[in-house]
Structures are given as structure tokens and as C-alpha cells.
Amino acid sequence: MLLLASIPNQRAAQAFIDYLKLQHIHANLQNESANELGRLEWEIWVDPDGFHQAQTFYQEFVSNPNDPKYLDASWQVGQPQTQQTQSFGMARIWRSAGPLTRFITLLCASVFLLSWFGFYGFFKAHFSFSFELTEFYRVVTPHLST
């Protein structure tokens, strides 16, 4: 199987897969690969024998994805042929997370692990502050040394 394209819209990708099946080209829809922006996309994999013909059909699809022939193909095929395996948990969250979220997650995990391995005193000495219950504003304001 060869990767033909990645499409962010699952319904459009499925309609194109159904159209390829009507053209007797064996194709599969693989779910959820993350692009460089962290958005999920659906991969279209095509049998090597029909790859060049599928490329031609894909160019037609890109130029007019709302053509009724693609939706009609879904009705003619009858059932969606998507794979039922989906990834859940941290792997899916990590793939869809942006760079800031990944950075904060790694920072928190690093602080936790370093604290667990004996660097708790270092973090307490450099990053903690004391306040009285009557000085609740110190929780949200900068720490002023006295």
C-alpha cells in the first residue's frame, strides 16, 4: 500500500475511498495522523497497482471535492470501510497537542521526577514562598521579601 494523501475531513476522505472502490481500486483509510500543526488528518492508502490512476482521481477530487459523484459513491458502496481501531489515551493527546502544551507537560514531568529523585529541597528553597492566611493576596501577587 502506498500513501496517496492526507485529508483533515474524515467524511470527505471516506467519500473519496468509496469512489475509488467503485473504480475497482483497492484503498484503505487510516485514521488520525497529526500534521505539523498538530491537527489530525486521515491518510488514504492505495494498492500499488492502481496508484497512478488513483492520483489522477485525487487531482479531480481536490479540484472539486463537493462533486455529487463522491457522495453517490458512498451510497452505492453501502457501508463505510474505515478501520475501527482508534488510539486513545496519552498518545492521541500528545499527537494533537501544540508546542506550548508539550513544553509545559515536559516541564511538569521533569520537576516531578527531579523532586522524586531527591531534588525537592532545591525546588523548595528556590521556588517556594511563605504567606500567612491573613495575607491571601500573596498567592496572586509577587513575593516581596521583608
Image (cartoon, rainbow, N blue to C red):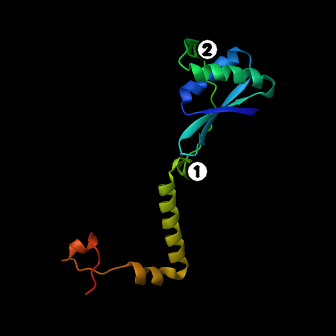
- For the question of whether residue 86 can be seen, the reply is no
Mark 1: few/some/many CA within 10 Å (<14, 14-19, 20+): few
SS at badge 2: helix
Residue drawn where x is 71% and y is 26% of the image = 27
Q: How many marks?
A: 2
Residue drawn where x is 56% and y is 20% of the image = 65
**In terms of image quadrants, where is residue 2?**
top right
Q: Which mark is residue 72?
A: none
Between 86 and 103, the one nearer to me in the picture: 103
- Compared to residue 92, the image places residue 77 above or below, namely above
SS at badge 1: helix
Residue drawn where x is 60% and y is 25% of the image = 14
* Residue 55 image point, x, y percent: 71, 24
Residue type of the residue flagged with mark 1: Ala
Provide the residue designation for mark 2: 73
Extreme residue toward the left, this view: 134
* Residue 32 image point, x, y percent: 59, 39
Q: Which mark is residue 91?
A: 1
* Residue 48 image point, x, y percent: 80, 28
> CB atoms at circles 2 and 1 under 8 Å apart?
no
**In terms of image quadrants, where is residue 144?**
bottom left
- C-alpha span from label 2 to label 1: 33 Å
* Residue 126 image point, x, y percent: 41, 81
- Compared to residue 104, the image places residue 27 above or below, namely above
Residue drawn where x is 71% and y is 15% of the image = 23
**In terms of image quadrants, where is residue 85?**
top right
Extreme residue toward the bottom, this view: 146
Quarter of the image with the C terminus in it: bottom left
Residue type of the residue flagged with mark 2: Ala
Between 117 and 32, the one nearer to me in the picture: 32
